[in-house]
Image (cartoon, rainbow, N blue to C red):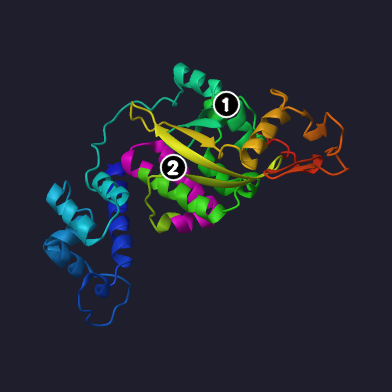
Amino acid sequence: MHNDRRGRGELADFLRSRRARLRPDDVGLVSYGARRVPGLRREELARLAGVSPIYYTRLEQGQSLNASDSVIDALAGALELSDAERAHLYALARPRASKRRQPRPPDTARPGVERLIAAMHDVPALLLGRHSQVLAWNELGHLLFAGHYDRTAPQRPADRPNLTRMLFLDPHTRELYRRWDEEASRSVASLRVAAGRFSDDSELTALVGELIVKSPEFAGCWARHPVQVCGSGTKYLHHPVVGDLELDYEALHLADDDGQRLLTYTPVAGSGHEAALRLLRASAGSQQVPGLRAVAGTVHRQDDGRARGVAGRGPAAHDGGSLGEESRWPDRPQR
């Protein structure tokens, strides 16, 4: 019952947020009377969607469940929803029946997926659960996003890093993103999609509650109800070891539809960002870059020494960033 009430509240919040962003002039209606709040009135939206104002009011208030496809599609059209927002509306208006059941066991990475990630030596890769917890990562994925965390943390459910929590609450992760506001909005929009699909996930609900309490920025963004399926794009990073990076990412959803997704990050071939990734991998001592030797976050030229990156004597420069003693990851957080 609790989940049903929460679902009805989510539906009301979503519909109100989308009514608020449309003005009568935007949809060909004549405005009349003083408006206490921006956007369309309920009766105006009902008229556009071809439903009765009484029915729409009951739907927005959560008093009318299981709206028909035609009603949901009409509302989506009247509200000018994107494909992702339309799917989200369906998820909220048609909540899955809540069943009493045993607590959900922690998500796990399938062995085959773990081996696949480990085999991607030159591509940072992470496997995320339905609420952005890291289930597995390869060495380069760990070095890229969370070098200040224990490499083995994803193997322990209680210690798993959560990318959304890190983005809003971990200052080192915040410094990683050159376009933090853009990344934050995208993260919340993706989490909204998950919350609509998995409304009975208590861990997801707890995560949202924690972030609302601890991060005013998250709370403000969550209240705007952004919805977006973030399947691909570009990450603009400033890594503490190799400097600026631009990496294209792809989010690949696993076939069992349990909310797990594999994220990969690749630079443009031949770019300085590709060279920076090679240097990052070399900094862990797992692979030597031709002409360079990485020692404790410091790069030394192995040929004639013309561009030595010895700590305190100037880092070796490249167009993806630089390596130097002052740019190491900070100490790992105490868990």
Task: Give the percent coordinates (x, y) of residue 13.
Answer: 32, 57
Q: Is residue 219 above or below residue 286?
A: below
From the viewer's side, name the closer residue of 322 and 307.
307
Q: In the image, which disc is placed on residue 138?
A: 1
Give the quadrant of the N terminus: top left
From the viewer's side, name the closer residue of 227 and 240.
240
Q: In the image, which disc is placed on residue 217?
A: none
Task: Give the percent coordinates (x, y) of residue 170.
Answer: 61, 45
- Residue drawn at x 33%, y 37% is 200
Give the quadrant of the C terminus: top right
Label 2 and label 1: CA atoms lie apart by: 20 Å
Q: Give the residue number, with chain letter if any, for mark 2.
A: 232
Task: Give the percent coordinates (x, y) of residue 183.
Answer: 51, 50
From the viewer's side, name the closer residue of 88 and 183.
183
Q: What's under tag 2, amino acid-wise? A: Ser
Q: Which residues are magenta?
A: 194-221
Q: How many marks?
A: 2
Q: Secondary structure at mark 2?
A: strand
The image quarter containing residue 230 is top left
Could one spot residue 68 in this view of the protein?
Answer: no
Q: Earlier in the sequence, mark 2 or mark 1?
A: 1
The image quarter containing residue 290 is top right
